[in-house]
Image (spheres, grey):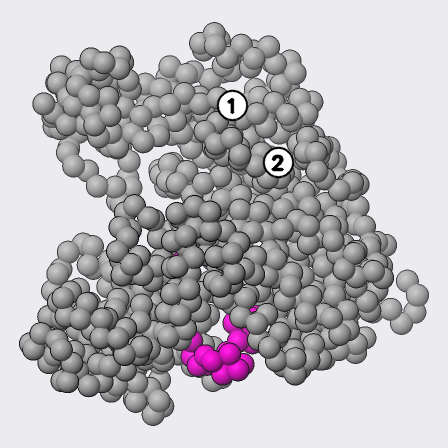
């Protein structure tokens, strides 16, 4: 090490050092998984600070999750101390919403604008569709929203949408809705997720002076996971970097997995054209995984035709081969994965947080949760219905949003009669109508509710509501703490009282959730020098799935492969490796992007450090019906030399057995008793969230009963197995033959 070099650089290899110390000018790093791309970004920021190349507030680092930004900040703090706190780090959405808040007035917004999540956006669209006399059951708000969102991300505005796309009725409707939707959001002083990327571009293009201010502010720009940026993200960073061109992007084309959300792999491919004097540094040593895991990953990704050439090697041991688990069904799969985890903990001393179970879709998590609970293994579920999406939480947040932005129509309509305070739907429709006529917000017009044309008794109720919101607002403005305001709001709105009066299990859970939200608010308040309700609301509206993942928690992680990007675990289970599940939709849908599914599989494999398991089921319950599943094609693409069965036989030794799928059970492992695994499933699910309609054996679906199925028609139950949520029946249908059905889910009726 030459003298004077900061000693933290000794934690880097030669290529990494080169990338870190190449401070000025555009820099592109395209490198395989686990090669230290994220580490290079972290060290590069520390180095810039240490070399006084920039003040912390002049460095902008964009990450894929807020959690990744937080962690990076902590590491930088460890390397160079407290000045790391002032860095601008976060997701595109959180960084640009911050900038928009400063500059809101320049584009006709108030600084306290609300951020609408997908759900809110769809509510607005549904309302518009109704006003245009379309049936939201026929024209799905979700479909329209997707189209609008895609357009925004490609920077196609409402006016030009018409010229670009109108070729079908749906596009025609989208074009109409798109314009009204934008207007409605503006009137509500609200932006949707996509606006957070699109509005800054408009801001910068309309106000060159403001653009220049931010160009000067962000002397260095760094972007992680660049392969997953979309067109708007590309454009906004290009604008910001145009003056100094100190832009460093890192990514891996093989890990591009968000094209369904508009991510554009060409952003990485075109970097060298956009910045002619760009330097490119390769990173070739993988520090994460064993040789076996890397070899496995490599054998998969090389099946894709469109990949950039990259080298990836490791000096780690060969390690364990990848174990393939072949299961009877999804319950069997969950139980076996849980048993393997128990064994690994016992034999090798792994801790719960060394494990991740990765699946393709969120709904797969439920059986794993049950199996882990039964074995008393702690787990954390990342994703799924988030806390902040629960009805009661969204309600309370709607009230709080009104306190900072009362013009927000979606949130106002959400709670104007929640809890029920005698403002009927007809009165609400009248209010909406009059607001439209006056091109004003509902909040504005209800200030003079007495003069409006509304059912009289409702007027008094609206008045009380308006007065309450105004009172709470002025208290908050007068300096009342956020938590006191929330407490007063919950009392005065009657929201808590309604829950207590309902006094059901469900309403008590809702109450507990609200108390949990109050805790979160107090926690936020204590941690900030200048806490503001508006900033708090913004922060939580930008929480992403992965942000909730806590690697120090002593728990097994359950998450989708998408959410696992950038993370690493000693032991990884990739489950549900079946056609039409992973890869997704390959059978039904011809235009499914199989290369993207394969990249997703590559991402999953490369999360593993030491041990990797693949698992698939021979059958799976779908829509209440048992379906035969075929092995994922990916299992056949894997280098046969690196995989083994549970008994340790290599797949090449057993290959003919696997290929001989049609010959019934002969392809099973000898030490695994299928029959036993199948018939012994008599446990009762301990899950409290599952609702039992009948006690076991007491429901009417006994052998011999005649039944009607909504799809298969009439039939008769010829056998029955399993208990509780596991109960299954075999029905002989007059027209469709024999089917095995899960009672819990099958649309069956006794006739
Ligand atoms: P991904 O493509 O999955 O995002 P990545 O390229 O960002 O991976 P990192 O997460 O930065 O890779 O690094 C992978 C692991 O290797 C981390 O645990 C990191 O700390 C470690 N690592 C990287 N470089 C070195 C090094 N020079 N010495 C020791 N460990 C390293
Ligand atoms: Mg990374």
Most foreground residue, 76 or 90 = 90
Residue 9 visible from this viewpoint? no
Pointer 2: what residue? 595
Residue bearing mark 1: 631
Residue 505, placed above or below residue 373: below
First in residue order: circle 1 vs circle 2: 2
Say left or right for 258 vs 424.
right
Residue 692 lies left or right of residue 536; in this view the side is left
Is residue 527 at all visible to an observer of this figure? yes
Residue at screen point 71% across, 52% down: 268
Write down the region rendered in magenta. 95-118
Between 307 and 283, the one lying in front of the other is 307
Q: Is residue 322 left or right of residue 550?
A: right
Taking 107 as reference, is 511 above or below it? Answer: above
Give the residue furthest to the left.
Answer: 457
- Going by the picture, which residue comes out furthest to the right? 2
Q: Quadrant of the C terminus?
A: top left
The local secondary structure at tag 1 comes to loop
Which quarter of the picture shows residue 595? top right
Q: Residue at x 16, y 81 (%)?
A: 452
Q: Residue 504, image x and y in percent?
A: 15, 56
From mark 1 to mark 2, how far is it between C-alphas?
A: 18 Å
Q: Compared with residue 209, is residue 614 higher up or lower down, i.e. above or below? A: above
Residue 55 percent coordinates (x, y): 72, 80
Q: Secondary structure at mark 2?
A: helix
- Residue 473 x/y as whole percent: 30, 85
């Amino acid at each position: 090490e030459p003298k004077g070099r900061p000693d933290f650089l000794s934690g880097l290899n030669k290529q990494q050092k080169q990338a870190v110390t190449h401070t000025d000018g555009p820099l592109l790093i395209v490198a395989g998984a686990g090669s230290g791309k994220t580490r290079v970004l972290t060290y590069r920021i520390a180095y810039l600070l240490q070399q006084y190349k920039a003040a912390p507030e002049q460095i902008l680092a964009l990450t894929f999750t807020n959690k990744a930004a937080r962690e990076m900040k902590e590491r930088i703090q460890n390397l160079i101390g407290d000045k790391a706190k002032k860095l601008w780090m976060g997701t595109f959405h959180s960084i640009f919403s911050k900038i928009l808040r400063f500059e809101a007035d320049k584009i006709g917004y108030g600084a306290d604008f609300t951020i609408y999540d997908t759900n809110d956006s769809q509510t607005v669209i549904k309302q518009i569709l109704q006003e245009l006399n379309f049936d939201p059951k026929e024209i799905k708000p979700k479909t329209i929203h997707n189209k609008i969102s895609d357009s925004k991300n490609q920077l196609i505005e409402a006016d030009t949408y018409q010229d670009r796309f109108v070729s079908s009725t749906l596009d025609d409707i989208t074009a109409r809705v798109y314009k009204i939707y934008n207007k409605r959001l503006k009137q509500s002083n609200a932006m949707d997720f996509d606006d957070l990327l699109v509005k800054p571009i408009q801001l910068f293009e309309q106000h060159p002076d403001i653009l220049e201010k931010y160009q000067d502010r962000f002397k260095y720009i760094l972007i992680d996971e660049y392969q997953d940026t979309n067109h708007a993200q590309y454009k906004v960073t290009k604008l910001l970097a145009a003056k100094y061109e100190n832009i460093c992007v890192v990514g891996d084309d093989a890990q591009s997995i968000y094209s369904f959300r508009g991510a554009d792999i060409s952003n990485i491919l075109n970097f060298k054209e956009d910045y002619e004097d760009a330097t490119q540094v390769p990173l070739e040593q993988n520090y994460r995984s064993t040789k076996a895991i890397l070899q496995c990953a490599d054998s998969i990704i090389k099946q894709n035709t469109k990949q950039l050439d990259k080298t990836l090697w490791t000096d780690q041991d060969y390690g364990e081969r990848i174990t393939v688990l072949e299961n009877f069904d999804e319950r069997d799969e969950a139980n076996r994965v849980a048993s393997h985890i128990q064994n690994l903990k016992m034999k090798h001393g792994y801790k719960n947080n060394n494990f991740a179970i990765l699946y393709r879709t969120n709904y797969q998590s439920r059986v794993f949760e049950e199996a882990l609970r039964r074995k008393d293994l702690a787990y954390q579920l990342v994703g799924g219905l988030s806390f902040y999406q629960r009805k009661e939480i969204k309600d309370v947040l709607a009230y709080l949003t009104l306190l900072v932005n009362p013009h927000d129509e979606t949130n106002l309509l959400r709670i104007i009669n929640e809890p029920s305070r005698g403002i009927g739907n007809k009165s609400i429709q009248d209010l909406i109508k009059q607001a439209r006529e006056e091109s004003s917000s509902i909040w504005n017009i209800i200030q003079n509710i007495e003069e409006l044309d509304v059912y009289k008794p409702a007027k008094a109720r609206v008045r009380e509501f308006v007065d309450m919101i105004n009172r709470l607002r002025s208290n908050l403005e007068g300096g009342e703490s956020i938590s006191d305001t929330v407490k007063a709001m919950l009392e005065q709105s009657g929201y808590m009282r309604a829950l207590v009066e309902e006094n059901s299990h469900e309403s008590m859970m809702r109450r507990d959730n609200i108390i949990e939200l109050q805790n979160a608010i107090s926690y936020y308040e204590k941690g900030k020098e200048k806490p503001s309700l508006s900033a708090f609301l913004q922060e939580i509206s930008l929480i992403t799935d992965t942000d909730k993942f806590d690697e120090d928690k002593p728990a097994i992680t359950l998450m989708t492969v998408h959410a696992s990007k950038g993370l690493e675990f000693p032991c990884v289970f990739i489950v549900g490796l079946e056609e039409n599940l992973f890869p997704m939709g390959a059978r039904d849908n011809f235009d499914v992007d199989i290369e993207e599914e394969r990249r997703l599989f590559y991402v999953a494999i490369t999360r593993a450090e030491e041990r990797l398991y693949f698992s698939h089921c021979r059958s799976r319950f779908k829509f209440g019906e048992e379906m035969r599943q075929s092995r994922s094609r990916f299992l056949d693409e894997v280098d046969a030399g690196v995989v083994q069965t549970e008994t340790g036989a290599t797949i090449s030794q057993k290959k003919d057995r696997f290929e001989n799928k049609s010959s019934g059970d002969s392809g099973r492992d000898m030490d695994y008793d299928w029959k036993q695994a199948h018939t012994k499933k008599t446990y009762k699910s301990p899950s409290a969230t599952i609702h039992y309609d009948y006690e076991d054996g007491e429901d009417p679906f006994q052998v011999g009963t005649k039944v009607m199925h909504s799809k298969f028609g009439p039939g008769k139950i010829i056998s029955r197995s399993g208990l509780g949520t596991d109960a299954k029946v075999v029905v002989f249908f007059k027209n469709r033959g024999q089917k095995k059905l899960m009672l819990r889910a099958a649309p069956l009726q006794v006739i």
